[in-house]
Amino acid sequence: MALTDTRTARVLFTALLFLAGLGLIYLTRHTLILFLFAIFFAYLVEPLVSHMARWVRTRTRAIAVIYLGLAILLTLFFSFIGPRIGHEAQRLTENLPALLGNITSGQIAVQIGSQHGWSFHTQQQVKDFLAGHSGELAQLASRAGLRVATVAQNVWWLILIPILAVFFLRDGRTFTDVALMMIGSRPQREFVENVINDLNDMLAHFIRAQLTLAGLALLVYVVFLGLMRVPYALVLGTAGGILEFIPVVGPFVAAVLMLGVALLMSYQHLLLLAVFLGIWRLIQDYVTLPRIMGESVQLHPLAAIFGVLAGGEMAGVIGVFLSIPVMASLRIVWQRWRIYAEKRKFGPLEGYIAVAPNAGPKL
């Protein structure tokens, strides 16, 4: 009886400890997200740092050289292309209230209808419908503006993330070795080491693949929208490339943004723009993404959708971005745990000898 009570107490204590850990993660989720982005940035520039370290002998010097090169590239970008993007963004911001006013008043129906040959009766019906739902439309626009403002509040992360990434680039391997040295059991040590190696490979490939997809999308958007003379093509193309980073939701929001601005500006080739966006989405999802991403993530569509929805509930847009790598990380841990459990079941782990603290890798 006492044995049962002791075992029950251990189970309850473990469950409470697990719940407390989940609560701590939820309370500190914003800080953890900041550190996750720093880790992602470190994975992004790690190949450059490792290659440069062969020339300058130390990782600290290599990090300094790479950061200096990135700073020069960003300065050149904002010196030549940045002013044009800023000018278009300013014009769009100034015209946005008037454009939204045309929607809530229903006047946009008259403008579009006259261009596409709608009958007077159809124009009037659409105009009355928009005017009758002006309150809902204004509320929707207000919510969208609040979301954008919330994201803009985290702009200071763009400065803090590279700073935090320096520590992961310089001491990341040391952190891993110290964590492994704290594990005394050889099987558990192998389990954690395998999980870390798999996570390293998955995250490195995922971040670089996302950057490649986003850069390709930005180039295609800017070129096509510019050739088709879509209003604010440079701003919309840049926004589309940035939104490509956000899984599932980002491309959809980019398409809605482009079509919405084109509609408000009474763009004549709206149908052609919609067809292009549909074809480009199919190309990205079924041609370029499988070739670039490969099998690094290996998530079922239902798991990806669940992760996107859960991430959005927990941390908004940032949570949506982190949803796919987090779900993929959970898959890796689960697979490695199954292998560890099989070894524990058939391998008798009691025969393994605990590793002494001084037997681990040297720093």
Image (spheres, grey):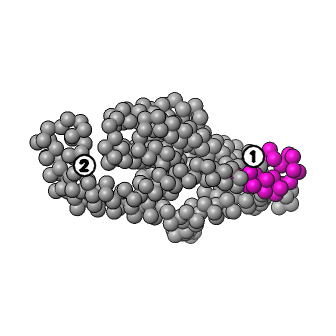
The residue that mark 1 highlights is: 48
Name the residue at 39% across, 61% down.
145
Name the residue at 86% across, 56% down.
362
**C-alpha span from label 2 to label 1:** 51 Å
Identify the image quadrant of the C terminus. bottom right
* Mark seen at residue 356: none
In this view, 355 is above or below 199: below
Q: Is residue 31 something that shows in the picture?
A: yes
In this view, 89 is above or below 120: below
Q: Name the side, left or right, on which 82 lies relative to 310.
A: right
Image coordinates for residue 187, horizontal then vertical, percent = 72, 50
The residue that mark 2 highlights is: 108
213 and 89: which is toward the camera:
89
- Amino acid residing under circle 2: Ile
- Amino acid residing under circle 1: Leu
Tell me the element at label 2: helix
Would residue 235 be counted in the magenta stretch?
no
**Residue bounds of the magenta highlight:** 50-70
